Amino acid sequence: MSRCLHRRCALLCALAAIAGAGLTAAPALAAGNAIINDCQTHGRLTATYSVGALRHALHTLPASAKEYTDCYDVINQALLTATGRARKPGGGATGGGSGGSAVPTPVIVIIVVLILAAVTFGALALRRRRMATDGPGRDPANAPGTTRLMSAPEERGEDPTRVQEPPEDDRDD
């Protein structure tokens, strides 16, 4: 029984070693790739490479090199140039791009939602305040702070040609 257990343990260790080697194969291949080494060393490609080699370099480029270097862009531009789809100087880009922003999009969306919420709650507060001062059964035209328009003399039954004298002061001078 111990012999069978040793065989199983050895088989599991071998499988684990093969799986571990398979997981680390891509970065190892990328480290040996001449195009990636050329880009990481010089910041540009110093030689001419085939389309297949450039595609292979893009596919095997490690995530750390994509994130911390501009090798992906350099190799991709070389690939576009080799296939004849490169950007022409002064003629604009073939692909559309968007303008960058210092503030990420989710932060902008959150700010807009907060502003809309503030405006909504402010309007609700004003409405509640008006309802509290006006009262539910009061006429809003007679509420304090409202301006009433004067009706025409004909509507009041007065003579429209008569000039109304200003009220006299009751003060003694």
Image (cartoon, grey):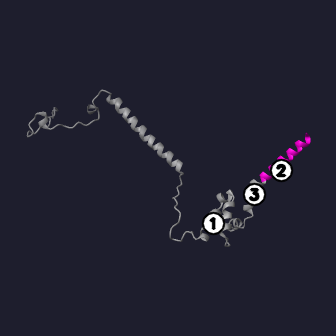
Magenta: main secondary structure: helix
Residue 44: within the magenta? no
Describe residue 164's horizontal placement relative to residue 76 as left or right: left
Q: Residue at x 91, y 43 (%)?
A: 3
Q: Position of residue 33 (x, y in %)?
A: 72, 65
Task: Report the number of discs.
Answer: 3
Q: In this view, does 116 lie above or below 133?
A: below
The residue carrying mark 3 is 25
9 to 39, vertically: above or below: above
Q: Name the residue beneath numbered marker 1.
A: 74
Instruction: State which region is magenta.
Output: 1-20
Give, as a three-letter code, the residue at label 2.
Answer: Ala
Q: What distance separates the C-alpha of mark 1 from that of mark 3?
A: 23 Å
Label 2 residue SS: helix
Within 10 Å of disc 2 (Cα), the crowding (few <14, some 14-19, many 20+) is few
Residue 165 seen anywhere in this rendered image of the structure:
no
Q: Mark 2 points at which residue?
A: 14
| Number of other residues with Cα within 10 Å of mark 1, as a class: few under 14, some 14 to 19, many 20 or more | some
For this view, does 42 lie left or right of residue 170? right
Mark 1 and mark 3 lie on one chain; the one further toward the N terminus is 3
Where 138 sits versus 71, above or below? above
Question: What separation in Å lies between label 2 and label 3 (alpha carbons)?
Answer: 16 Å
Q: What element carries label 1?
A: helix
When asked about the image quadrant of residue 74, the answer is: bottom right
Decide which of 131, 20 is in the foreground and name it.
20
Quarter of the image for residue 37 reads bottom right
Q: Do the residues labelled 1 and 3 touch (CB within 8 Å)?
A: no
Q: Where is residue 80 in the image (x, y as percent from the top left)?
A: 60, 68
Specify which label sits upstream in the sequence, 1 or 2: 2
